[in-house]
Amino acid sequence: MSQTDTSRAKAPPETADRQVPRWLPFLVLGIGLLAISFGAILARYAQANGLPSLAIATLRLAFAALIVTPIALYQSGRVLGALSRRQLLLATAAGFFLALHFATWISSLAYTSVASSTALVTTNLLWIGIASFVLFGERPGRLMLVGIVISLTGSVLIFWSDSRTSAAGSQPLLGNFLALVGSWCFSAYLLIGRRLRANLPLAAYVWLAYGCAALFLVIACLASDTALAGYTGAAYLVALGMAIGPQLLGHTAYNWSLKHVSPTFVAVVTLGEPVGSALLAWLLFDEGFALLQGAGFSLLLFGIYLAARAERG
């Protein structure tokens, strides 16, 4: 879609994103990856404190939307008031897929290990690559393709090793399927966000996406009789921590980067999440990992490095 598309409301000069140093998106993505690696860990703590998976997803996004509301209204109030119908539809679609992503992925953690769940939910790179080629005719370069293949190989090794050695879930197939559905939904979210983010300031985009997702999840809670009140203070503190850390710091870093690097590269970076999450699960939950998983982690990191070289190329 061209920059002259009149169906989109354009940001005023004072809210437009400035040119940034070439290295900054890579630093921001690294910080975001570190923050998001805590997502599965905090979800496990929330489940241990009695929060149902759907409630965890809802509170995470609701808290995040509430925190960012005054910032979005102050910085981008004029932009939000001039949104086109197309932008509102895109924001609704992005929120819908983001809601599904968290509902399915957080639920998967109740059935399978952190390593398998995060390895599968970050396979969005494969789906985004296929969709970008089919829908937009985008062909990744040779080095990017090598990085993709190596990173996905690492994910497969992690999942294979974990499926053979882990006793973390009584229904690992269900958990793995839910994580895979979460990956499909996050892929759709990134592709829609690429279109929507192009002419929207970060605060406006984040508020729309997180707010719409929270509304969809609240509706799901009402439809399924999932309570959002009556839990312990510790449970709400963990949910708030998920909103501030993995959501606002982690996912917002990804959203900011969408305007400066390709969604394919953002998807490559997300493949590093299983490394951080599995290491944290090993330290905090004693979820050990085998030598084969360690090889998979190494391949993931090397693939990300190659993709970064291709993106900066």
Image (cartoon, rainbow, N blue to C red):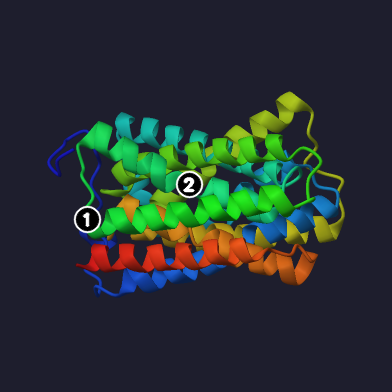
- Quarter of the image with the C terminus is bottom left
User: In terms of secondary structure, where does tag 1 sit?
Assistant: helix
Seen in the image, is 312 located left or right of residue 291? left
Specify the quadrant of the image occupied by residue 141. Answer: bottom left
Q: Which disc number belongs to residue 142?
A: 1
Residue at 62 percent of width and 47 percent of height = 62
> Image height check: is 78 above or below 107?
below
Q: Which residue is mark 2?
A: 123
Q: Position of residue 275 (x, y in %)?
A: 57, 64
> Image height check: is 25 above or below 129?
below
Residue at 60 percent of width and 61 percent of height = 293
**Is the residue marked by circle 1 packed among few (<14), some (14-19), or many (20+) residues within 10 Å?**
few
Specify the quadrant of the image occupied by residue 37. Answer: bottom right
> Image height check: is 11 above or below 223?
below
Seen in the image, is 73 located left or right of residue 107? left
* Residue type (three-letter) at the residue carrying disc 1: Arg
State the residue in front, 215 or 268: 268
User: In terms of secondary structure, where does tag 2 sit?
Assistant: loop
Q: How much space separates mark 2 and mark 1, taking CA atoms?
A: 19 Å
Specify the quadrant of the image occupied by residue 217. Answer: top right
> Image height check: is 253 above or below 27?
above
Q: Earlier in the sequence, mark 2 or mark 1?
A: 2
Q: Position of residue 263 (x, y in %)?
A: 33, 51
Residue at 79 percent of width and 28 percent of height = 225
State the residue in front, 251 or 110: 110
* Residue type (three-letter) at the residue carrying disc 2: Thr
Residue at 73 percent of width and 53 percent of height = 165
Q: Position of residue 29 (x, y in %)?
A: 41, 66
Q: Position of residue 4 (x, y in %)?
A: 12, 41
State the residue in front, 198 or 124: 124
